[in-house]
Amino acid sequence: MSDFRSLYRHGMARLAACTMPVRLADPAANARLLADMTADCDALGVAIAVFPELGLSGYAIDDLRFQDALLDAVEEQIAVLRDESRNWSCVIVVGAPLRHADRLFNTGVVIHRGHILGVVPKSYLPNYREFYEARHFAPGIGRRGETIRLDGTDIPFGTDLLFEAEDVPGLTLGVEICEDLWVPAPPSTALALAGASVIANPSASNVTIGKADERHLLCRSQSARSLCAYVYAAAGAGESTTDVAWDGQVSIYEAGRVLAESARFPTGAHHVLADIDLDLLRQERMRMGSFGACADAHGVSTAWRRIVFTLAPPQGDIGLRRNIARFPFVPEDPRRLAQDCYEAWTIQVSALSQRLRESGAARAIIGVSGGLDSTLALLVAARAADELGWSRNRVEAYTMPGFATGETSRGLAHALMTALGVSAHELDIRPTALQMLETIGHPFARGEAVHDVTFENVQAGLRTDFLFRLANQLNGLVIGTGDLSELALGWCTYGVGDQMSHYNVNAGMPKTLIQHLIRWLAREGQLAPDIGPILERIVSAEITPELVPGDAKGVQSTEEKVGPYALQDFNLFYTLRYGFTPSKIAWLAEAAWQDATQGGWPAHFPHDRRIAYDLPQIKHWLRVFLQRFYGFSQFKRSAAPNGPKLSPGGSLSPRGDWRAPSDGNAAVWLAELEHNVP
């Protein structure tokens, strides 16, 4: 078995997009440089390296393309590269002009371990404005099932070729060339529908003002629409600037995301590397049933020749060329984070406004603890009242101290309610709770310090019970406060408890995003004068349910029980969004969290909370997550109240993203974790 820290063990593959300074009409010089670059890529563990269009001859050579001496030299150097490739595990895609069937074709030649695996002709030839390719080349569109003779060997030739690595599940390469991407129906669409997870595009598209943005848009959108990795390798230095210029920018995309991109106008040989997630692409295609339906509709399942090869990638730790965000629900880029906060907040407000409007309710009823979740829910309710044209005093807010309520949180609850101008109330639940404990014969009612789950849930249940009865009395709706993270971990009291409400505005909101959203509202929300400092104090406080009186260790800590929300939200994202194995999630978590000084942190994240977690900690808390998520908490999710989905990471609504048996178990996930994580 490969090393646990080998990326190839975890459904990843390393790709390279390469550009190089060509010598025009000098295939031998170009092949030497290409071989040197491939050797470098191979040493770095690259699976597939893509080079520019017509890189062996140079693109901007016009009628020299017809010269037999040049074309003979191109074929000779393809043979040289084929022979040198015996020493490389890396697959290379090389651009070359090749003769076939009394025509000249602009091709991508796929070479690996001493073999030419296949030759793919360019389907569509640009012949407008500055382009004159139809003067020299025949179009490849419709060329299927053919072979081309190279160095005495018949090689598969056509636009119907897929190259599959038999020892790297999911690594299947398709090739299209430059202009093929610019047409209304790119060949890469059909290639992806037929199973290609990686699209290589050897390109020589010249550069004009604004064209880089267009190229970026096309590559990104094609990778998103086709759910693939897209490797774009542009020609640059050395190409003739008689009438046009070149920027040599290379880039790698995955499912709509830019993984790596070079600077523009490099002067020498240059490559960018990125590790693509083949499991992610497979999961996305499998979950999106319309992807497979589209493949069936276009009849692409049987019309392809599949060239199988053995990659034999490195099995040790070669690092990771991919940014793994510590907080997958929370972007690191400040502008994107602000946008996500705005959108999440606005979705919550508009969803609650709609529910209040259509229900005919006269008031919103909400419990306020002074903690994160109820704070956000109260902010949403106040803004929804504004949107509905209500006076904010129609938001009936209750802080309900129990046996462990601290003065700090109680004070914050009152400060928040006062600042927002809602109807503020304090309802002491302790007398009723004590009566219930006495009625059921609980030891606490006899003066014994027994703080078990019954003691906790009597308090949590009474709070919700009071809110529902108040809603009856005041013609209101109970606004839920429990968040996505708590629902995932089952950290809520079922039924008559914080699991239940008339409408839960936080149902799709993970704890880590709540923290950032409240910080954003403290700066940008303009909800009330001087509310910012109150929100900052709330978001900086210890996360606690305040159901058990403090001891020598201090207040009751949620994260000591269920784990750090930073890790548990990480585990939730990759479980819910992609269905990854526990061992892969642990590997990703170690990459993201092992060193607090490396990688990015979200904007405004406190420096004193920028900590690291090692693999034993990650494994421990992932085990807790698996036990809670799969083992016993589904019954709480199966009865979850209505609430809006907020994140593309998913929701846990039994009517939406997540449907599972309430009597399931965690055995298979725990076994995978124990067997595959050291």
Image: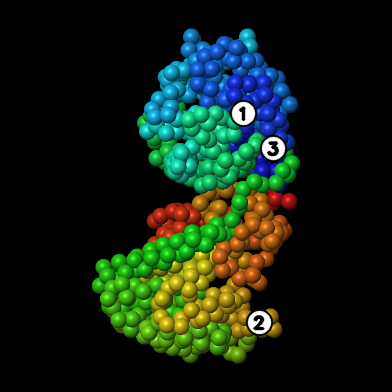
Would you say the residues marked 1 and 3 are in contact, meaning their CB atoms lie under 8 Å apart? no
Q: Which mark is residue 45?
A: 3
Find residue 214 and report its horizontal and vertical position in percent: 44, 42
> Which callout, 2 or 1, points to the residue nearer the camera?
1
| Residue drawn at x 30%, y 81% as measured from the top left | 391
Q: Which mark is residue 554?
A: 2
Left or right of 404 in this view: 388? left
Disc 2 packing (10 Å; few <14; some 14–19; many ≥20): few
| Residue drawn at x 43%, y 18% as measured from the top left | 135
Q: Which numbered disc, 1 or 3, marks the residue that appears first in the sequence?
A: 1
Q: Which numbered disc, 2 or 3, marks the residue that appears first in the sequence?
A: 3
Q: In the rendered structure, which amino acid carries the disc numbered 3?
A: Gly
Q: Mark 1 — residue?
A: 22
Q: In the rendered structure, which amino acid carries the disc numbered 2?
A: Gly
Find residue 586 and report its horizontal and vertical position in percent: 65, 53
Find residue 149 and report its horizontal and vertical position in percent: 57, 11
| Residue drawn at x 58%, y 14% as measured from the top left | 71
| Residue drawn at x 68%, y 62% as measured from the top left | 596
Q: Which residue extends farthest front? A: 242
* Circle 2 SS class: loop
> Which callout, 2 or 3, points to the residue nearer the camera?
3
Task: Say which of 248 and 2 sits in front.
Answer: 248
